[in-house]
Amino acid sequence: MRYLPLPLPLSPLAVALWLASSPSQALELEPQVITANPLGNAQLATPSSVLEGDRLLLQQKGSLGETLNGEPGVSSTWFGPGASRPIIRGLDGDRIRLLRNGGG
């Protein structure tokens, strides 16, 4: 039994001609409805807070981690008195940068 090889340059040409001769049909898609929040961003509850002034002075503890512990999205590690770091939304260690008085 002998096999007759197809010439390689004719194979892609034959496929291209076959695809060009087939009728193209438009695909009809269902309509998509996109909605947005009618309240806008200003009226949404956001998990953030600002700690400043008298509230900061009243809440201030021995370390930054202890001071920020309990704020939305913040917990802290504890390595002993005065040695804790904040965990902000699950990120800690090298994943967050702490600045004190503008310096790291």
Image: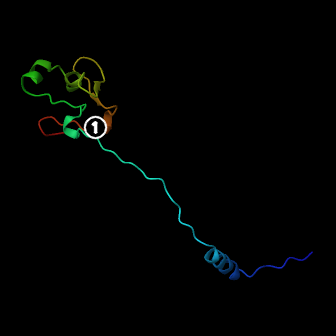
Tell me the residue that label 1 is attached to.
96
Quarter of image, res 20: bottom right
Crowding at dot 1, Cα within 10 Å, few <14 / some 14-19 / many 20+, comes out as: few
Foreground residue, 42 or 97?
Answer: 42
Foreground residue, 1 or 57?
Answer: 1
Residue 34, position in %: x, y? Answer: 36, 48
Q: Residue at x 80, y 79 (%)?
A: 5
Foreground residue, 15 or 102?
Answer: 15
Q: Which residue lies furthest to the right in this view?
A: 1
In-image side of 33 versus 99 (left or right): right
Quarter of image, res 74: top left
Q: Which residue lies furthest to the left in this view?
A: 54
Residue 46, position in %: x, y? Answer: 24, 33
Residue 26, position in %: x, y? Answer: 53, 65
The amino acid type found where label 1 is placed reads: Ile
Foreground residue, 28 or 97?
Answer: 28
